[in-house]
Each structure stands twice: as C-alpha cells, then as structure tokens.
Image: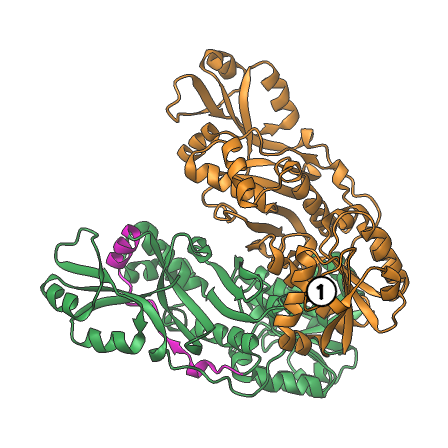
Chain colours: A green, B orange
C-alpha cells in the first residue's frame, strides 16, 4: 500500500484525488501496489467533503510521517510550494508537481536535491496538461537528437485565436467573451502576453538541451496586437495564426522564443484548435512528430500528476531519467535568427516598402487602404532596421 | 560499456547501426554507459561495409557471449526470429524488436519468458515507427482507463488514399504509381488488404486491455474497393476516407476492427496524410489525445528500436512496465456494434433504399446515375440485413 499526500486542494489537487479514486484499480496494478490518499494539505477546511478527515493544515504532519513516500504538489506559485517541495525531497520523499512556475524557476535545484536524497522530482503536468510531452522527451525519444520543439502551449490564447479566426472578431471582444465563459482569467496578462507559454517552453527547452534555459532570457510576445484583419489576410494565404512557443537548435545557434506566428494549413499544428495544445518535435532520426491533447483542465492535468505518482511508487527512490543540469544553456539573440515576415503598411507607404524590402510578395485581401506583403527570409535584426524606415501597421512572423 | 547485437542487417537493422553511430553521445548519456554494436547476425557477408568485421552467421556466437546483454531483433517474420528471441531471453539477454508479426503472434509468451529469466522484451518499433505509442500506453497514460484507440497505422494505404483524395485518381492507378516509387510492395496485399494494420491494432488492443487480442479475431477490410467517386462524395460531406484500425471498449463491448472509414475534417486524424501515421487515444480522464509521426522508414523505426536499447541497458534486467497477459480478451462481434454508414446505390434503387433506410440523409455530389445517403446509427447486423434488399454499389462506415 502506497500512501500519498496532496498539497493544495484546489482544481488540480481535487482532480488528483478524483483520478486516484475513479481509476484506483488500473492505477494500483500499474504502480505495483494499492495507492491511497492519506493527507490533503490546505489552509481551508472542507466540511462535508468525503475527504474531509484527510485534510491537514500543517506540512510537518506529512513530512514526519514515514508512511508517506510520495507527495503531489498542486499548490502553484513559488512559495510555499518551493519550501515544501525542498523539505519533502530532503526528507527522502519523492515529489511530483503541476507547478510550471516552480519548475521553471527551480527545476535543476530540486532535481539535484532529489538525487542527493534517493528521491525523484517529476513534473509531467507542468507542461501540456494531458499530453505526456515530458516523458516523451525524457523516456521515449532517447535515441534522438531533438533539434526543434514548437508548441501551442497555452489553451486560453489558442481559444481566443481560434474564435477570432472563425468569427472574424477582434481580440478585445473575444477576450471579453472568454472571460465570461471562464476560459480566461479576469487578469489575463499571464496568458495573453505569453508569460505562461514562456515558462512552459523554458522547461521543454531545458530538457531538449540538457542544460538550463531560464524563462527570463526567452523573447516573449503576446497576442494582444493581432487583429481581425490579420486573420483575413491569413485566410487568403492559407495560413493560421498561432501563439507558438519554440526552441530550435539550428545553424543560427540555440534560440527560444514565444510569439504569434503564421503557419501554413499543411502544418501539423494548424489543426490544433480551441483549448487544445499541441507540441511538434523534430528529431534528427525520426523527423517530425506531434503530440496533441488537452493542455489544461482539472482531470487531464490531474491524470498527468497521477501518472507521475505511478512512476514514483514503482521507482521507490531509484533515479528516474531526467537530464537537466544547472549549467546555463547559451541562447542566441533572436535578432540573429532568420525567418520571413508578413507585413501590413498603409497604402501611402507602398512605394517605401517596395524600395526597402526586395522581392516582397504582395498579398491582397481586399483592403484598399493597405498594402500587405511577405518578406524574403532575413534576420530579425535586418527586418527591424528596414521596418524602422516604413510605417509598419502590423507584422507577424512566419513559420514552416 | 554496453555491447549489443543486431539480428538482421536489412533496412531496420542497418538503421539501428546508423542511429547508434550518429547519436552515440546522447544515447550513451541516456543509457548511463557507452553503447556499442558488437555483432550483426546475417546470412550474407557485407564486403566493404564499415561493420563488415562484426557480421556473424551463427546465432550461438551471440547467445554464448556473456558480454552481450541486449539484442535487437530486426529480422521480421516468425522464424527464425521467434526461436532466436526465445533462446536469447532464456539466456537472460533482453530483446527489443521491430517485428510486428512476431509480437502479434507470440507477444505474451515472449514477455513471460523474459520475466522468468530476469530479462525484458520491448517492441516500441513494432507499431507506428517513430511514434512512441507503446511507451505512451505502457508508461505515460498510466493513470487512465483508455477506452478507445483509433489509428492510421499503415503508411502505404494512407499514401494511396491521400493521393486518391488529392488527385481524384482511382485505386489501381495510384497503387501502380506507389509501387513504381517504392512506397508499395510488388505484392501489396499485406498493406492494401489491411493485414499489416490488423497486426498493429492487435498489439495496441492487447496493451489497452491488458489481455491478449489475437489478430486472427479482428474483422479486417482493406481499401481496394474505395473509388474516386467515394472521394467526390466525401469532399461534399467535408469528410476524409482513411483506413482506420480501432479498438473500443464501449457499451457495445470490447471490439476491434480494421476498415476504411469516413472521418470529419475536424477530427484530429483527418490531417494525417501521405506516409504519416497517427494514433488517437481516448482516456476516461484525459479525454482526447493524438500522437503523430512517421509510421515507417529506416531511421524513424530504428530510432524506436534504439530507444528500447536505452531502456534495456538502463534496466539491467529489472522488469520494465508492460501489462499483457496471455488470457484472451473477449471480443464483441462487430455485427453488434453501432455506427452510421455512407451508401451509394443506383438511381433506379432510390425508392427501395428510401423504403428500407428510415431517416436517411441524401448526399448530392452531382452524379445523376446514383443515389447516395448516410444512414441513421444502426448495428452492422441491421445494416447488412437492409443492404441485402437494396443493390448497394458501395458502403463506407462513418466515424466521429
């Protein structure tokens, strides 16, 4: 019998309890022994909840109980999650988490503490919810040199962009509706400015390189400037507009970024719509692969946490594979990276644009007041220098 | 230093050698020690090949060498692959394979022999080439009750159907071109009649249920009867036609089948085109997920084999997770399962069809000599009884 503790009885924490209850039989078979929730740590009480009697308010009850070998940290945020996770690992208890903030901030440190204490630290649920992308990198594609990860990693922005695309609506009105439906937070900054996707690609980039990619060093641009007109052009061009979080190891060097991109309708990520996430992985032997599923939500995320529980119970502290050192991964300035750009200028600036951008491809979506075009492949730096000389209304990077 | 042997120096076997050579550094890091090919078993000699000196013709050299703890069986077919794998496992050597035929025929037996001899038997490459679908079921989605697996598991037929769709061509002419290009065998029966997909879904169905689904018991129908007209109708209906291999645990019972299906253009499998494979997995907690990649080809398949090598080297004989007993999974007769059908009859039979099939939805693709329609949801048995009374020109099942 493996007895576990859940830290935080919010959406994901209560999902973990529900998954363990609903699928107890197959989970126990796969874990090699019965799995039972012994404690739930929360500041609140939950009178009438079937798990009421398991709720405790003091982390030390859990840390000092020798029966507890596995802890699910589903609190979110840096503190007290960081202190609790550290203490648990130092006590030789393995920890799994859905906390992308904490993993992006302290992943290598927590992995080292785990290793030093014959414990494991797992974080499948921190990226891509129900998509087993962390295991795919750490345990499945182990014969590969992964050279590119390109993900739609934030469900809220993908929902907003999908609605804008389908309904021809503008960002503001779709965001408002998404907030009313509960798909976007009242303060939507973390999602719409790309900060959430940035933390997630920081984690995936680190696993891709084996070194530490800090989220603070990743160029991040949100979707707030995308307009209905951009989508009108995209449609003419048979492209979609997606918030991509990417990490690439190319001739330009190793770089990571988050920004809205146009992608062609033949790209595997094109059909990842609504709140779904997709992660596209390129390896030097296997070529393209793609992983698709729910990126958030109580039960998909909890299922990922409990998948970690199964591994932790089976492993009994023996080290599970994860290569992520605290050595910093050097990142190329994205100013040096190459791509094409979709650009809109006022029709008055057409001549200036044509002079500045050689071999541009004009795009006509029926707006007489504008001139739109796609540039040649150029560095971000070159583009910025040219764009300064033209009054650019909007520019979107192009992928694939 | 882990020394391994490769049985069969054909396409996949030579790919295994190439992957180990190209990605030796990351593979060795992930395996925990350097990995080196010591023997290659083949009936042929390979004069001038850089690995010429490693080629042996006698399996006993490998079986009797205590330095060899991991063997890659990339011979294909039942014999001598079965005997060699059995002997290797009995000698306590772990085996990984790309041989779907052998796994579908003898999987549970070989897993039991492995277990009894402190060895492992892995077969990631036997299904879906570069898609890590076996690990996804065995090691990632361990908190789930998987209730449906629906796959495009055969690249040759998917290539043919994609070409028919895009070019409006008929099966025969596309097959001929595919054979010329080497995408289809001279004897294409195993692919176009669905036998290859059948073996693969037998393996996935077994892992989904934990029991043994024998391929001989899976209803299998190929793509030879699909015509250009069927695609013309599909286009009007915003559907694609795909050879689906599926396994479902529903109110109808547990059933598995391989057949061409229409799927809507919103289905994640719709965009799986050309030689790519896709596997759609539904779990009771995570909802929908999809895994996409190259289903065949030298290097993607070899990458999957070498991923198994990494696990086998790490595990050193400790049991790796795989639940697949020799107890037979009871299968529901597909005659009892429910679905809708797309049907074409001669225009002369329109009245008869309308009489026989209540609430049909007519489909007009501009063919005056035909009457086409979609039925209500009904069992296969009911459909067959009704179809007998009408002169059906073609019928395709509908999914999703």
Give the letter of the chain under mark 1.
B
In this orientation, does residue A288 appear? yes
Judged left or right of residue A169, residue B183 is: right
Q: Is residue B348 above or below residue A49?
A: above
How crowded is the residue under tag 1: few (<14 C-alpha within 10 Å), some, or many (20+)? many
Q: Residue at x 42, y 83 (%)?
A: A217
Instruction: Please state the horizontal and vertical placement of residue A308, each as a whole percent of the image.
Output: 67, 69
Instruction: Please state the horizontal and vertical placement of residue B272, each as a whole percent of the image.
Output: 51, 48
Q: Is residue A232 magenta?
A: yes
Disc 1 designates what residue? B308
Q: Residue at x 57, y 66 (%)?
A: A133
Q: Residue at x 64, y 66 (%)?
A: B18
Judged left or right of residue B287, residue B33 is: right
Judged left or right of residue B363, residue A286 is: right
Q: Nearer the viewer, residue B309 or A51?
A: B309
Q: Residue at x 68, y 39 (%)?
A: B195
Q: Is residue A163 above or below residue B231?
A: below
Q: Is residue A217 magenta?
A: yes
For the record, the magenta segment spans A212-236
Is label 1 in a helix, a strand or a loop?
A: helix
Instruction: Please state the horizontal and vertical placement of residue A207, each as a whole percent of the image.
Output: 57, 75
Q: Nearer the viewer, residue A24 or B207?
A: B207
Quarter of the figure that contains the N terminus of chain B? bottom right
Q: Is residue A15 above or below residue A251?
A: above
In this orientation, does residue B142 appear? no
């Amino acid at each position: 019998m493996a007895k576990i503790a859940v830290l935080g009885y919010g959406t994901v924490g209560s999902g973990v309890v529900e998954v363990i209850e609903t699928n107890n039989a197959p989970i126990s078979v796969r874990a090699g022994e019965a799995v039972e929730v012994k404690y739930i740590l929360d500041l609140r009480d939950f009178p009438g909840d079937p798990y009421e009697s398991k709720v405790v308010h003091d982390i030390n009850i859990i840390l000092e109980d020798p029966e507890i070998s596995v802890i699910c940290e589903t609190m979110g945020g840096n503190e007290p999650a960081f202190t609790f996770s550290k203490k648990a690992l130092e006590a030789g208890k393995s920890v799994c988490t859905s906390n992308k903030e904490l993993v992006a901030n302290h992943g290598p440190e927590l992995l080292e503490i785990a290793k030093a204490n014959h414990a494991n630290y797992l974080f499948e649920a921190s990226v891509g919810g129900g998509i087993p992308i962390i295991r795919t990198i750490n345990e499945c594609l182990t014969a590969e040199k992964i050279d590119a990860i390109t993900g739609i990693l934030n469900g809220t922005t993908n929902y907003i962009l999908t609605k804008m695309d389908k309904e021809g609506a503008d960002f503001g009105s779709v965001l408002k509706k998404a907030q009313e439906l509960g798909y976007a937070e009242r303060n939507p900054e973390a999602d719409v400015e790309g900060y959430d996707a940035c933390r997630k690609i920081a984690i995936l980039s680190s696993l891709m390189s084996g070194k530490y990619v800090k989220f603070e060093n990743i160029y991040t641009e949100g979707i707030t400037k995308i307009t209905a007109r951009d989508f009108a052009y995209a449609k003419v061009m048979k492209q979609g507009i997606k918030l991509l979080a990417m990490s690439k190891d190319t001739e330009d060097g190793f770089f990571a970024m988050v920004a809205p991109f146009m992608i062609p309708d033949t790209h595997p990520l094109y059909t990842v719509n609504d709140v779904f996430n997709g992660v596209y992985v390129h390896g030097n032997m296997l070529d393209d692969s793609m992983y698709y599923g729910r990126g958030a939500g109580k039960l998909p995320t909890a299922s990922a946490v409990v998948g970690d529980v199964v591994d932790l119970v089976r492993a009994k502290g023996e080290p599970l594979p994860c290569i992520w050192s605290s050595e910093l991964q050097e990142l190329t300035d994205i100013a040096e990276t190459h791509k094409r750009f979709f650009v809109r200028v006022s029709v008055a600036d057409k001549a200036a644009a044509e002079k500045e951008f050689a071999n541009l491809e004009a795009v006509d979506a029926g707006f007489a007041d504008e001139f739109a075009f796609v540039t040649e492949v150029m560095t971000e730096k070159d583009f910025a220098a040219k764009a300064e000389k033209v009054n650019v209304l909007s520019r979107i990077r192009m992928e694939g």
